[in-house]
Image (tube, rainbow, N blue to C red):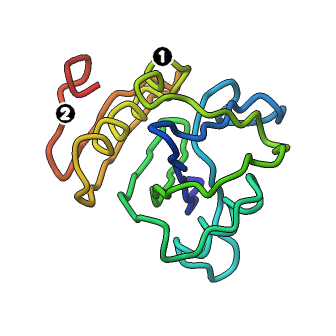
């Protein structure tokens, strides 16, 4: 089983998120999806250190550590053998525009329009949580071999897939 520690951050400005359309890398698990910015831990980094570094590398924005809000721990499991523990953050984005990123195209997207993008099915669950509450949450999502969401557990409670939670 492949185990990964990662971070993901949604930078916010004017009721928009800075989203990355993952179209640049050939072998990308997120190919053609829209996600936030972030990536894999390096060395002995904490989640905060990792997200600060990744946001800077991918956007050019040097955001102080204390300006990141640690919002959730997301556990991803895949029937393909992948296991990922992701720390989810939000942060207010400073003025200016992001630099070009080699991993995808960065675009500002209205928060209400995010659900219309090509997202991972489970991402809609944590976007809803980010909208509805400032409370820290835990979300486990399991995907089958065709990348279909087969299980979602929010704060210990299994969600009924195909219903309002998504």
Residue 148 placed where, x, y %?
44, 23
Looking at the image, which residue is at 39% across and 27% down? 149
Q: Relative to 47, is 73 above or below? A: above
Residue at the outermost left position? 157
The residue wearing badge 1 is 116
Q: Relative to 73, is 161 above or below? A: above
Residue 37 placed where, x, y %?
63, 49
The residue wearing badge 2 is 159
Foreground label between 1 and 2 = 1
Label 1: few (<14), some (14–19) or many (≥20) C-alpha neighbours in 10 Å:
few
On screen, residue 104 versus residue 64, left or right, reads right
Q: CA distance from mark 1 to mark 2?
A: 21 Å
Number of residue marks: 2
Please state, as top left, top right, bottom left or bottom right, where the C terminus lies in the image: top left
Q: Relative to 137, is 102 above or below? A: above
Residue at the outermost bottom position? 44
Q: Residue 22's image quarter? A: top right
Residue 106: which numbered mark, if any?
none
- The answer, for residue 33, to whether it is visible in the render is yes
Element class at badge 1: helix
Residue 7 placed where, x, y %?
55, 59
Between 133 and 95, the one nearer to me in the picture? 95
On screen, residue 128 versus residue 63, left or right, reads left
Q: Residue 54's image quarter? A: bottom right
Element class at badge 2: loop
């Amino acid at each position: 089983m492949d185990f990964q520690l990662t971070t993901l951050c949604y930078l916010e400005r004017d009721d928009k998120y800075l989203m990355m359309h993952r179209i640049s890398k050939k072998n990308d698990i997120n190919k053609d999806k829209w996600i936030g910015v972030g990536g894999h831990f390096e060395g002995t980094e904490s989640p905060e250190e990792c997200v600060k570094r990744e946001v800077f590398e991918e956007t050019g924005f040097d955001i102080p550590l204390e300006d990141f809000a640690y919002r959730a721990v997301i556990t991803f499991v895949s029937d393909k053998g992948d296991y990922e523990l992701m720390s989810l953050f939000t942060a207010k984005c400073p003025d200016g525009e992001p630099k070009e990123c080699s991993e995808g195209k960065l675009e500002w997207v209205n928060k209400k329009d995010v659900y219309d993008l090509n997202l991972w099915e489970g991402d809609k669950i944590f976007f809803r949580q980010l909208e509805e509450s400032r409370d820290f949450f835990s979300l486990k999502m399991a995907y089958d071999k065709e990348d279909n969401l087969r299980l979602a557990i929010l704060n210990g409670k299994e969600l009924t897939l195909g219903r309002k939670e998504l």
